[in-house]
Amino acid sequence: MFLINCPYCGERDQQEFKAGGEAHIERPKEPTELSDDEWAEYLFMRKNIKGVQFERWNHTHGCRKWFNMIRDTSNDEIKAIYKMGEKPPSQ
Amino acid sequence: MRNKYSVFSLIKNALSYHENWQRAWKDPAPKKEYDAVIVGGGGHGLATAYYLAKKHNMNNIAVVEKGWIGGGNTGRNTTIIRSNYLWDASAGLYDHALKIWEGLSQELNYNVMFSQRGVMNLAHNLQDVRDLKRRTHANRLNGIDAVYLSTEEVKKFCPIINTSPDIRYPVLGGTLQRRAGTARHDAVAWGYARGADAMGVDIIQNCEVKGIKRNGDSVEGIETTKGFIKTKKIGVVAAGHSSVIANMAGLRLPLESKPLQALVSEPVKPIIDTVVMSNAVHAYVSQSDKGELVIGAGTDDYVSYTQKGSHQIVEGTLNAILELYPIFSRMRMLRQWGGIVDICPDASPILSKTSIKGLYFNCGWGTGGFKATPGSGDLFAHTIANDEPHKLNAAFNLNRFVSGDLVDEHGAAAVAH
Protein backbone atom coordinates (compact mmCIF):
# COMPACT_ATOMS: atom_id res chain seq x y z
CA MET A 1 0.00 0.00 0.00
CA PHE A 2 1.44 3.34 -1.05
CA LEU A 3 0.58 6.70 -2.56
CA ILE A 4 0.90 7.35 -6.29
CA ASN A 5 1.31 10.80 -7.76
CA CYS A 6 -0.88 10.61 -10.87
CA PRO A 7 0.56 13.00 -13.47
CA TYR A 8 -3.00 14.22 -14.18
CA CYS A 9 -4.76 14.14 -10.78
CA GLY A 10 -2.02 14.40 -8.15
CA GLU A 11 -1.32 12.17 -5.17
CA ARG A 12 -3.85 9.41 -4.58
CA ASP A 13 -4.04 6.08 -2.76
CA GLN A 14 -2.69 3.07 -4.67
CA GLN A 15 -6.16 1.46 -4.36
CA GLU A 16 -7.41 3.83 -7.08
CA PHE A 17 -4.90 2.44 -9.57
CA LYS A 18 -4.42 -0.73 -11.54
CA ALA A 19 -0.97 -2.07 -12.31
CA GLY A 20 -0.52 -2.78 -16.00
CA GLY A 21 2.72 -4.75 -15.90
CA GLU A 22 6.11 -4.17 -17.44
CA ALA A 23 6.50 -0.97 -19.47
CA HIS A 24 8.16 -0.35 -22.82
CA ILE A 25 7.27 -3.71 -24.36
CA GLU A 26 6.72 -2.73 -27.95
CA ARG A 27 4.02 -4.36 -29.99
CA PRO A 28 5.72 -6.20 -32.86
CA LYS A 29 5.76 -4.04 -35.98
CA GLU A 30 5.39 -7.03 -38.31
CA PRO A 31 3.20 -9.50 -36.40
CA THR A 32 2.88 -11.84 -39.37
CA GLU A 33 6.66 -12.24 -39.56
CA LEU A 34 7.04 -13.32 -35.91
CA SER A 35 8.15 -16.84 -34.98
CA ASP A 36 6.44 -18.73 -32.13
CA ASP A 37 9.45 -18.04 -29.91
CA GLU A 38 9.20 -14.32 -30.56
CA TRP A 39 5.46 -14.35 -29.85
CA ALA A 40 6.09 -16.16 -26.55
CA GLU A 41 8.73 -13.60 -25.68
CA TYR A 42 6.37 -10.70 -26.44
CA LEU A 43 3.26 -12.16 -24.82
CA PHE A 44 4.50 -14.02 -21.77
CA MET A 45 8.14 -13.53 -20.82
CA ARG A 46 8.73 -10.82 -18.21
CA LYS A 47 11.77 -9.42 -16.42
CA ASN A 48 9.93 -9.48 -13.07
CA ILE A 49 12.80 -7.58 -11.47
CA LYS A 50 13.51 -7.45 -7.76
CA GLY A 51 14.70 -3.87 -7.64
CA VAL A 52 14.09 -0.94 -9.95
CA GLN A 53 11.49 -1.82 -12.54
CA PHE A 54 9.71 0.13 -15.30
CA GLU A 55 5.92 -0.29 -15.19
CA ARG A 56 2.68 0.93 -16.67
CA TRP A 57 -0.15 1.98 -14.38
CA ASN A 58 -3.73 3.12 -14.99
CA HIS A 59 -5.70 5.47 -12.76
CA THR A 60 -8.81 3.28 -13.05
CA HIS A 61 -10.83 5.04 -10.33
CA GLY A 62 -9.74 8.53 -11.37
CA CYS A 63 -8.87 9.99 -14.74
CA ARG A 64 -8.54 6.50 -16.29
CA LYS A 65 -5.35 7.55 -18.04
CA TRP A 66 -2.28 5.39 -18.45
CA PHE A 67 1.18 6.49 -17.35
CA ASN A 68 4.62 5.03 -16.64
CA MET A 69 6.28 4.50 -13.30
CA ILE A 70 9.76 3.57 -12.14
CA ARG A 71 9.43 1.67 -8.89
CA ASP A 72 11.70 -0.35 -6.63
CA THR A 73 9.84 -3.64 -6.19
CA SER A 74 11.97 -4.62 -3.20
CA ASN A 75 10.50 -1.82 -1.06
CA ASP A 76 7.67 -0.33 -3.18
CA GLU A 77 9.46 3.03 -3.36
CA ILE A 78 8.45 5.06 -6.41
CA LYS A 79 11.45 6.61 -8.16
CA ALA A 80 9.74 8.51 -10.97
CA ILE A 81 6.46 8.90 -12.82
CA TYR A 82 6.20 10.04 -16.44
CA LYS A 83 3.54 10.17 -19.11
CA MET A 84 2.95 7.69 -21.88
CA GLY A 85 5.14 8.31 -24.89
CA GLU A 86 7.75 10.17 -22.85
CA LYS A 87 11.28 8.89 -22.45
CA PRO A 88 12.05 7.64 -18.93
CA PRO A 89 13.84 10.33 -16.88
CA SER A 90 17.40 9.51 -15.92
CA GLN A 91 17.43 8.58 -12.27
CA MET B 1 22.43 -43.60 12.36
CA ARG B 2 19.14 -41.79 12.54
CA ASN B 3 17.02 -42.49 15.60
CA LYS B 4 13.41 -43.35 14.86
CA TYR B 5 10.65 -41.23 16.35
CA SER B 6 8.17 -43.36 18.28
CA VAL B 7 6.24 -43.40 21.52
CA PHE B 8 9.21 -45.18 23.09
CA SER B 9 11.68 -42.50 22.00
CA LEU B 10 9.27 -39.92 23.38
CA ILE B 11 9.17 -41.63 26.78
CA LYS B 12 12.94 -42.14 26.79
CA ASN B 13 13.59 -38.49 26.01
CA ALA B 14 10.98 -37.32 28.48
CA LEU B 15 13.03 -39.02 31.20
CA SER B 16 16.00 -36.82 30.30
CA TYR B 17 13.83 -33.68 30.14
CA HIS B 18 13.93 -33.61 26.33
CA GLU B 19 17.50 -32.36 26.42
CA ASN B 20 19.09 -35.20 24.46
CA TRP B 21 17.10 -35.37 21.23
CA GLN B 22 19.29 -36.06 18.23
CA ARG B 23 19.68 -33.19 15.74
CA ALA B 24 17.09 -33.62 12.99
CA TRP B 25 19.56 -32.44 10.35
CA LYS B 26 23.21 -31.42 10.29
CA ASP B 27 24.55 -27.95 9.60
CA PRO B 28 27.32 -28.67 7.09
CA ALA B 29 29.64 -26.30 5.24
CA PRO B 30 29.26 -26.68 1.47
CA LYS B 31 31.54 -29.14 -0.32
CA LYS B 32 33.43 -28.03 -3.42
CA GLU B 33 31.29 -30.08 -5.76
CA TYR B 34 27.94 -31.85 -5.83
CA ASP B 35 26.15 -34.02 -8.39
CA ALA B 36 23.18 -31.65 -8.11
CA VAL B 37 22.29 -28.54 -6.15
CA ILE B 38 18.74 -27.53 -5.28
CA VAL B 39 18.29 -23.79 -4.88
CA GLY B 40 15.62 -23.09 -2.29
CA GLY B 41 15.00 -24.90 0.99
CA GLY B 42 11.24 -24.71 1.13
CA GLY B 43 8.94 -27.72 1.10
CA HIS B 44 9.24 -28.26 -2.66
CA GLY B 45 13.04 -27.96 -2.67
CA LEU B 46 13.54 -30.26 0.31
CA ALA B 47 11.07 -32.78 -1.14
CA THR B 48 12.99 -32.68 -4.43
CA ALA B 49 16.24 -33.45 -2.60
CA TYR B 50 14.55 -36.19 -0.58
CA TYR B 51 13.21 -37.99 -3.68
CA LEU B 52 16.47 -37.50 -5.61
CA ALA B 53 18.26 -39.35 -2.82
CA LYS B 54 15.54 -41.90 -2.17
CA LYS B 55 14.34 -42.86 -5.64
CA HIS B 56 17.26 -41.90 -7.88
CA ASN B 57 20.23 -42.72 -5.63
CA MET B 58 21.63 -39.21 -5.94
CA ASN B 59 23.08 -38.76 -2.47
CA ASN B 60 25.89 -36.34 -3.22
CA ILE B 61 23.55 -33.36 -3.47
CA ALA B 62 22.88 -30.17 -1.56
CA VAL B 63 20.01 -27.82 -0.84
CA VAL B 64 21.06 -24.19 -0.52
CA GLU B 65 18.71 -21.78 1.22
CA LYS B 66 19.28 -18.06 1.65
CA GLY B 67 17.41 -17.90 4.96
CA TRP B 68 16.30 -20.83 7.08
CA ILE B 69 14.46 -23.86 5.72
CA GLY B 70 10.70 -23.49 5.48
CA GLY B 71 10.97 -19.77 6.24
CA GLY B 72 9.49 -18.61 2.95
CA ASN B 73 6.12 -19.49 1.49
CA THR B 74 6.19 -22.94 3.14
CA GLY B 75 5.69 -21.20 6.45
CA ARG B 76 3.46 -18.47 5.01
CA ASN B 77 0.46 -20.28 3.56
CA THR B 78 -2.91 -21.55 4.71
CA THR B 79 -1.88 -25.25 4.43
CA ILE B 80 -4.84 -26.31 2.31
CA ILE B 81 -4.43 -29.58 0.41
CA ARG B 82 -6.84 -30.62 -2.34
CA SER B 83 -6.76 -32.01 -5.87
CA ASN B 84 -10.11 -30.95 -7.32
CA TYR B 85 -8.69 -29.24 -10.40
CA LEU B 86 -10.57 -29.06 -13.68
CA TRP B 87 -8.11 -30.10 -16.37
CA ASP B 88 -6.70 -33.60 -16.76
CA ALA B 89 -3.08 -32.46 -16.52
CA SER B 90 -3.69 -30.55 -13.28
CA ALA B 91 -5.85 -33.30 -11.82
CA GLY B 92 -3.05 -35.80 -12.49
CA LEU B 93 -0.43 -33.57 -10.90
CA TYR B 94 -2.33 -32.57 -7.78
CA ASP B 95 -3.86 -35.98 -7.14
CA HIS B 96 -0.42 -37.55 -7.41
CA ALA B 97 0.59 -35.23 -4.58
CA LEU B 98 -2.54 -35.99 -2.55
CA LYS B 99 -1.86 -39.73 -2.77
CA ILE B 100 1.65 -39.19 -1.38
CA TRP B 101 0.27 -36.96 1.41
CA GLU B 102 -1.93 -39.88 2.53
CA GLY B 103 1.10 -41.92 3.57
CA LEU B 104 3.64 -39.17 4.15
CA SER B 105 3.83 -39.15 7.95
CA GLN B 106 4.58 -42.88 7.98
CA GLU B 107 7.06 -42.62 5.14
CA LEU B 108 9.00 -39.78 6.74
CA ASN B 109 8.60 -41.06 10.30
CA TYR B 110 7.58 -37.48 11.02
CA ASN B 111 4.07 -36.38 11.88
CA VAL B 112 3.06 -33.85 9.25
CA MET B 113 -0.39 -33.73 10.86
CA PHE B 114 -2.15 -34.40 7.56
CA SER B 115 -5.83 -34.09 8.34
CA GLN B 116 -8.39 -35.12 5.71
CA ARG B 117 -11.10 -32.87 7.06
CA GLY B 118 -12.51 -32.09 3.62
CA VAL B 119 -12.45 -28.95 1.52
CA MET B 120 -15.72 -27.33 0.54
CA ASN B 121 -15.98 -24.78 -2.28
CA LEU B 122 -19.00 -22.50 -2.33
CA ALA B 123 -21.07 -21.28 -5.27
CA HIS B 124 -22.61 -17.82 -5.00
CA ASN B 125 -24.19 -17.28 -8.41
CA LEU B 126 -25.56 -19.36 -11.26
CA GLN B 127 -22.30 -19.35 -13.18
CA ASP B 128 -20.51 -20.63 -10.06
CA VAL B 129 -23.10 -23.42 -9.83
CA ARG B 130 -22.51 -24.43 -13.44
CA ASP B 131 -18.71 -24.22 -13.08
CA LEU B 132 -18.62 -26.22 -9.88
CA LYS B 133 -20.94 -28.91 -11.26
CA ARG B 134 -18.78 -29.17 -14.36
CA ARG B 135 -15.66 -29.44 -12.21
CA THR B 136 -17.29 -32.11 -10.03
CA HIS B 137 -17.99 -34.22 -13.13
CA ALA B 138 -14.48 -33.63 -14.49
CA ASN B 139 -12.98 -34.64 -11.14
CA ARG B 140 -14.98 -37.86 -11.01
CA LEU B 141 -13.97 -38.78 -14.55
CA ASN B 142 -10.36 -38.41 -13.38
CA GLY B 143 -10.94 -40.64 -10.35
CA ILE B 144 -10.90 -37.76 -7.88
CA ASP B 145 -13.55 -37.81 -5.19
CA ALA B 146 -15.97 -34.92 -5.50
CA VAL B 147 -19.61 -34.33 -4.66
CA TYR B 148 -21.91 -31.43 -5.35
CA LEU B 149 -23.85 -30.14 -2.34
CA SER B 150 -27.12 -28.23 -2.21
CA THR B 151 -27.45 -25.19 0.04
CA GLU B 152 -29.05 -27.38 2.73
CA GLU B 153 -26.21 -29.90 2.49
CA VAL B 154 -23.66 -27.08 2.78
CA LYS B 155 -25.41 -25.86 5.93
CA LYS B 156 -25.47 -29.40 7.32
CA PHE B 157 -21.78 -29.96 6.63
CA CYS B 158 -20.72 -26.61 8.10
CA PRO B 159 -23.52 -25.23 10.30
CA ILE B 160 -21.91 -21.86 11.03
CA ILE B 161 -22.22 -20.68 7.42
CA ASN B 162 -24.90 -18.09 6.84
CA THR B 163 -27.07 -19.61 4.10
CA SER B 164 -29.74 -16.94 4.27
CA PRO B 165 -30.91 -16.03 0.73
CA ASP B 166 -30.80 -12.29 1.43
CA ILE B 167 -27.05 -11.82 1.92
CA ARG B 168 -25.01 -10.04 -0.75
CA TYR B 169 -23.55 -13.30 -2.10
CA PRO B 170 -25.99 -16.06 -1.09
CA VAL B 171 -24.75 -19.66 -0.92
CA LEU B 172 -26.38 -21.51 -3.82
CA GLY B 173 -24.46 -24.76 -3.34
CA GLY B 174 -20.97 -26.10 -3.13
CA THR B 175 -18.59 -28.94 -3.81
CA LEU B 176 -16.88 -31.17 -1.34
CA GLN B 177 -13.69 -33.16 -1.64
CA ARG B 178 -13.54 -35.34 1.44
CA ARG B 179 -9.97 -36.56 0.89
CA ALA B 180 -8.76 -32.97 0.93
CA GLY B 181 -7.68 -31.20 4.09
CA THR B 182 -4.73 -29.53 5.75
CA ALA B 183 -1.26 -30.38 7.08
CA ARG B 184 1.24 -28.76 9.39
CA HIS B 185 3.39 -26.68 7.04
CA ASP B 186 6.56 -26.47 9.16
CA ALA B 187 6.50 -30.20 9.80
CA VAL B 188 6.50 -30.85 6.06
CA ALA B 189 9.74 -28.88 5.60
CA TRP B 190 11.32 -30.37 8.73
CA GLY B 191 10.23 -33.93 7.92
CA TYR B 192 11.66 -33.77 4.39
CA ALA B 193 14.83 -32.08 5.68
CA ARG B 194 15.34 -34.80 8.27
CA GLY B 195 14.65 -37.53 5.72
CA ALA B 196 16.97 -36.04 3.11
CA ASP B 197 19.73 -35.38 5.64
CA ALA B 198 19.59 -39.01 6.79
CA MET B 199 20.36 -40.07 3.21
CA GLY B 200 23.40 -37.80 2.99
CA VAL B 201 21.92 -34.62 1.51
CA ASP B 202 23.66 -31.45 2.72
CA ILE B 203 21.17 -28.79 3.81
CA ILE B 204 23.03 -25.49 3.75
CA GLN B 205 21.16 -22.59 5.32
CA ASN B 206 22.04 -18.87 5.22
CA CYS B 207 23.58 -19.48 1.82
CA GLU B 208 22.29 -17.13 -0.86
CA VAL B 209 22.87 -17.76 -4.55
CA LYS B 210 24.61 -14.78 -6.14
CA GLY B 211 25.25 -16.05 -9.63
CA ILE B 212 25.03 -19.01 -11.98
CA LYS B 213 28.17 -19.92 -13.85
CA ARG B 214 27.60 -21.08 -17.40
CA ASN B 215 29.87 -22.59 -19.94
CA GLY B 216 28.13 -21.96 -23.21
CA ASP B 217 24.82 -23.78 -23.06
CA SER B 218 25.41 -25.75 -19.87
CA VAL B 219 25.81 -24.89 -16.20
CA GLU B 220 29.07 -25.25 -14.26
CA GLY B 221 28.08 -24.20 -10.78
CA ILE B 222 26.71 -21.51 -8.52
CA GLU B 223 28.26 -18.53 -6.78
CA THR B 224 26.93 -18.27 -3.25
CA THR B 225 27.58 -16.21 -0.14
CA LYS B 226 29.48 -19.29 1.10
CA GLY B 227 31.67 -19.55 -1.97
CA PHE B 228 31.55 -21.24 -5.36
CA ILE B 229 29.90 -24.67 -5.60
CA LYS B 230 30.63 -26.75 -8.67
CA THR B 231 27.76 -28.79 -10.08
CA LYS B 232 26.37 -29.98 -13.41
CA LYS B 233 22.73 -29.93 -12.36
CA ILE B 234 20.89 -27.06 -10.71
CA GLY B 235 17.25 -27.37 -9.71
CA VAL B 236 15.77 -23.99 -8.91
CA VAL B 237 12.80 -24.08 -6.53
CA ALA B 238 12.81 -20.45 -5.45
CA ALA B 239 9.08 -19.55 -5.63
CA GLY B 240 8.69 -15.75 -5.74
CA HIS B 241 12.40 -15.30 -6.41
CA SER B 242 12.54 -17.66 -9.42
CA SER B 243 12.85 -14.76 -11.85
CA VAL B 244 15.77 -13.37 -9.85
CA ILE B 245 17.67 -16.65 -10.27
CA ALA B 246 16.59 -16.95 -13.92
CA ASN B 247 17.94 -13.47 -14.63
CA MET B 248 21.32 -14.60 -13.22
CA ALA B 249 21.41 -17.32 -15.87
CA GLY B 250 20.26 -14.96 -18.61
CA LEU B 251 16.82 -16.55 -18.88
CA ARG B 252 13.42 -14.93 -18.78
CA LEU B 253 10.40 -16.67 -17.29
CA PRO B 254 6.69 -15.99 -17.80
CA LEU B 255 6.27 -15.04 -14.15
CA GLU B 256 5.15 -12.10 -12.08
CA SER B 257 5.88 -12.04 -8.34
CA LYS B 258 3.18 -10.63 -6.12
CA PRO B 259 2.44 -10.50 -2.40
CA LEU B 260 -0.20 -12.93 -1.13
CA GLN B 261 -1.51 -12.51 2.37
CA ALA B 262 -2.94 -14.70 5.08
CA LEU B 263 -3.91 -14.04 8.65
CA VAL B 264 -4.86 -15.88 11.81
CA SER B 265 -7.20 -15.00 14.63
CA GLU B 266 -6.79 -15.44 18.34
CA PRO B 267 -7.21 -19.13 19.28
CA VAL B 268 -10.72 -20.29 20.15
CA LYS B 269 -12.46 -23.60 20.84
CA PRO B 270 -13.22 -25.85 17.83
CA ILE B 271 -15.82 -24.11 15.69
CA ILE B 272 -15.08 -25.16 12.09
CA ASP B 273 -13.94 -28.73 11.40
CA THR B 274 -13.37 -28.43 7.67
CA VAL B 275 -11.92 -26.01 5.11
CA VAL B 276 -14.34 -23.68 3.34
CA MET B 277 -13.29 -21.75 0.27
CA SER B 278 -15.25 -19.24 -1.69
CA ASN B 279 -14.08 -18.29 -5.14
CA ALA B 280 -16.47 -15.44 -5.85
CA VAL B 281 -15.88 -13.47 -2.66
CA HIS B 282 -12.31 -14.71 -2.29
CA ALA B 283 -12.38 -15.87 1.28
CA TYR B 284 -11.25 -19.12 2.72
CA VAL B 285 -11.09 -20.28 6.26
CA SER B 286 -10.10 -23.26 8.36
CA GLN B 287 -9.09 -23.75 11.98
CA SER B 288 -5.64 -24.78 13.10
CA ASP B 289 -5.00 -27.36 15.80
CA LYS B 290 -4.10 -24.48 18.10
CA GLY B 291 -7.59 -23.07 17.55
CA GLU B 292 -6.72 -20.09 15.39
CA LEU B 293 -8.90 -19.35 12.40
CA VAL B 294 -6.60 -19.47 9.38
CA ILE B 295 -7.80 -17.07 6.72
CA GLY B 296 -6.44 -16.66 3.21
CA ALA B 297 -6.70 -13.37 1.36
CA GLY B 298 -5.91 -12.43 -2.23
CA THR B 299 -2.84 -11.11 -4.00
CA ASP B 300 -1.98 -7.52 -4.66
CA ASP B 301 -2.14 -6.89 -8.38
CA TYR B 302 1.31 -5.32 -8.78
CA VAL B 303 4.78 -6.85 -8.75
CA SER B 304 6.38 -6.59 -5.33
CA TYR B 305 8.93 -8.52 -3.31
CA THR B 306 8.10 -6.82 0.00
CA GLN B 307 6.39 -9.75 1.78
CA LYS B 308 3.82 -7.27 3.09
CA GLY B 309 0.70 -6.78 1.03
CA SER B 310 -1.99 -4.11 1.17
CA HIS B 311 -4.43 -3.49 3.97
CA GLN B 312 -7.45 -3.22 1.69
CA ILE B 313 -6.96 -6.82 0.50
CA VAL B 314 -7.30 -8.08 4.07
CA GLU B 315 -10.24 -5.77 4.67
CA GLY B 316 -12.08 -7.13 1.61
CA THR B 317 -11.49 -10.71 2.68
CA LEU B 318 -12.68 -10.06 6.22
CA ASN B 319 -15.83 -8.35 4.91
CA ALA B 320 -16.64 -11.51 2.98
CA ILE B 321 -15.79 -13.77 5.93
CA LEU B 322 -18.08 -11.79 8.22
CA GLU B 323 -21.01 -11.98 5.87
CA LEU B 324 -20.61 -15.73 5.47
CA TYR B 325 -19.86 -16.35 9.16
CA PRO B 326 -21.61 -13.74 11.32
CA ILE B 327 -20.50 -15.75 14.36
CA PHE B 328 -16.92 -14.45 13.83
CA SER B 329 -17.91 -10.79 14.16
CA ARG B 330 -16.17 -10.31 17.49
CA MET B 331 -13.04 -12.33 16.71
CA ARG B 332 -9.77 -10.48 16.90
CA MET B 333 -7.03 -11.11 14.39
CA LEU B 334 -3.72 -12.06 15.89
CA ARG B 335 -1.26 -11.66 13.06
CA GLN B 336 -1.00 -11.20 9.32
CA TRP B 337 1.79 -12.05 6.93
CA GLY B 338 2.62 -11.95 3.24
CA GLY B 339 4.54 -14.27 0.98
CA ILE B 340 5.77 -13.61 -2.53
CA VAL B 341 4.07 -15.86 -5.05
CA ASP B 342 5.23 -16.44 -8.62
CA ILE B 343 2.23 -16.35 -10.90
CA CYS B 344 2.17 -17.84 -14.40
CA PRO B 345 -0.10 -16.43 -17.10
CA ASP B 346 -2.09 -19.68 -17.10
CA ALA B 347 -2.00 -20.08 -13.29
CA SER B 348 -0.32 -23.48 -13.66
CA PRO B 349 3.16 -24.37 -12.47
CA ILE B 350 6.34 -24.94 -14.44
CA LEU B 351 8.33 -28.13 -13.75
CA SER B 352 10.70 -28.12 -16.60
CA LYS B 353 14.05 -28.31 -18.28
CA THR B 354 15.27 -25.08 -19.81
CA SER B 355 17.25 -24.09 -22.87
CA ILE B 356 20.37 -24.30 -20.68
CA LYS B 357 21.62 -27.84 -20.09
CA GLY B 358 21.56 -28.84 -16.43
CA LEU B 359 19.32 -25.98 -15.36
CA TYR B 360 15.83 -26.96 -14.21
CA PHE B 361 13.01 -24.82 -12.89
CA ASN B 362 10.19 -25.71 -10.53
CA CYS B 363 8.16 -22.52 -10.19
CA GLY B 364 4.95 -20.74 -11.06
CA TRP B 365 2.92 -22.40 -8.31
CA GLY B 366 1.38 -19.02 -7.65
CA THR B 367 -1.16 -18.94 -4.87
CA GLY B 368 -1.49 -22.69 -4.38
CA GLY B 369 1.78 -24.58 -4.19
CA PHE B 370 1.69 -26.03 -0.70
CA LYS B 371 -0.80 -28.77 -1.59
CA ALA B 372 1.51 -30.08 -4.28
CA THR B 373 4.68 -30.28 -2.16
CA PRO B 374 5.26 -34.07 -2.18
CA GLY B 375 4.17 -34.57 -5.79
CA SER B 376 6.17 -31.58 -6.98
CA GLY B 377 9.30 -32.88 -5.25
CA ASP B 378 8.81 -36.38 -6.63
CA LEU B 379 8.22 -35.26 -10.23
CA PHE B 380 10.93 -32.60 -10.19
CA ALA B 381 13.43 -35.15 -8.84
CA HIS B 382 12.46 -37.44 -11.72
CA THR B 383 12.96 -34.59 -14.20
CA ILE B 384 16.40 -33.71 -12.82
CA ALA B 385 17.64 -37.29 -12.48
CA ASN B 386 16.53 -38.41 -15.96
CA ASP B 387 16.85 -35.09 -17.75
CA GLU B 388 13.32 -35.83 -18.97
CA PRO B 389 9.96 -35.00 -17.40
CA HIS B 390 7.73 -37.65 -15.88
CA LYS B 391 4.50 -38.12 -17.81
CA LEU B 392 2.58 -36.36 -15.01
CA ASN B 393 4.58 -33.14 -15.36
CA ALA B 394 5.24 -33.27 -19.11
CA ALA B 395 2.41 -30.78 -19.73
CA PHE B 396 3.96 -28.33 -17.28
CA ASN B 397 6.98 -27.50 -19.42
CA LEU B 398 8.31 -24.06 -20.27
CA ASN B 399 7.75 -24.67 -23.95
CA ARG B 400 3.98 -24.49 -23.52
CA PHE B 401 4.26 -20.70 -23.72
CA VAL B 402 5.75 -21.10 -27.18
CA SER B 403 3.47 -23.88 -28.44
CA GLY B 404 0.34 -22.33 -26.92
CA ASP B 405 -0.58 -25.59 -25.19
CA LEU B 406 -1.41 -23.80 -21.90
CA VAL B 407 -3.00 -25.44 -18.87
CA ASP B 408 -5.44 -22.65 -18.20
CA GLU B 409 -6.59 -23.05 -14.63
CA HIS B 410 -7.60 -19.38 -14.18
CA GLY B 411 -10.96 -19.43 -12.52
CA ALA B 412 -11.35 -23.02 -13.57
CA ALA B 413 -9.46 -24.06 -10.46
CA ALA B 414 -11.44 -24.06 -7.29
CA VAL B 415 -10.19 -20.66 -6.21
CA ALA B 416 -9.60 -17.36 -7.95
CA HIS B 417 -6.02 -16.48 -8.70
Image: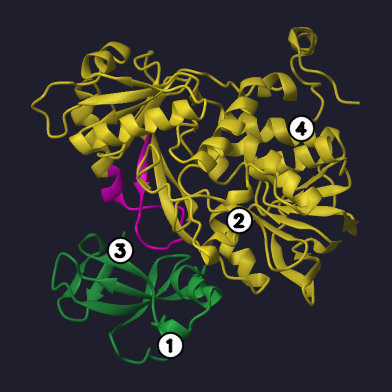
Chain colours: A green, B yellow
Q: Residue at x 70, y 49 (%)?
A: B389
In the rendered structure, does residue B239 fall within the stretch colored magenta?
A: no
Q: Residue at x 59, y 66 (%)?
A: B244
* Image spot of residue A76 (x, y percent): 40, 66
Label located before the other in sequence (3 or 1): 3
Which region is colored magenta?
Answer: B295-314
Q: What label does residue B360 carry, if any?
A: none
Quarter of the rendering occupied by the N terminus of chain B: top right
**Disc 3 chain ID:** A
**Quarter-wise, where is residue A66 in the image?**
bottom left
Front residue of this view, candidates B117 and B302: B117
Q: Mark 1 — residue?
A: A91
Label located before the other in sequence (4 or 2): 4
In the rendered structure, does residue B305 fall within the stretch colored magenta?
A: yes
Q: Secondary structure at mark 4?
A: helix
Q: Mark 2 — residue?
A: B397
* Image spot of residue A27 (x, y percent): 38, 82
How far apart are labels 1 and 2 at the CA level?
Answer: 38 Å
How far apart are labels 4 and 1 at the CA level?
Answer: 48 Å
Q: Residue at x 84, y 41 (%)?
A: B56
Q: Mark 4 — residue?
A: B194
Q: Residue pushed farthest left? A: B166
Q: Amino acid at mark 2?
A: Asn
Q: Secondary structure at mark 3?
A: loop
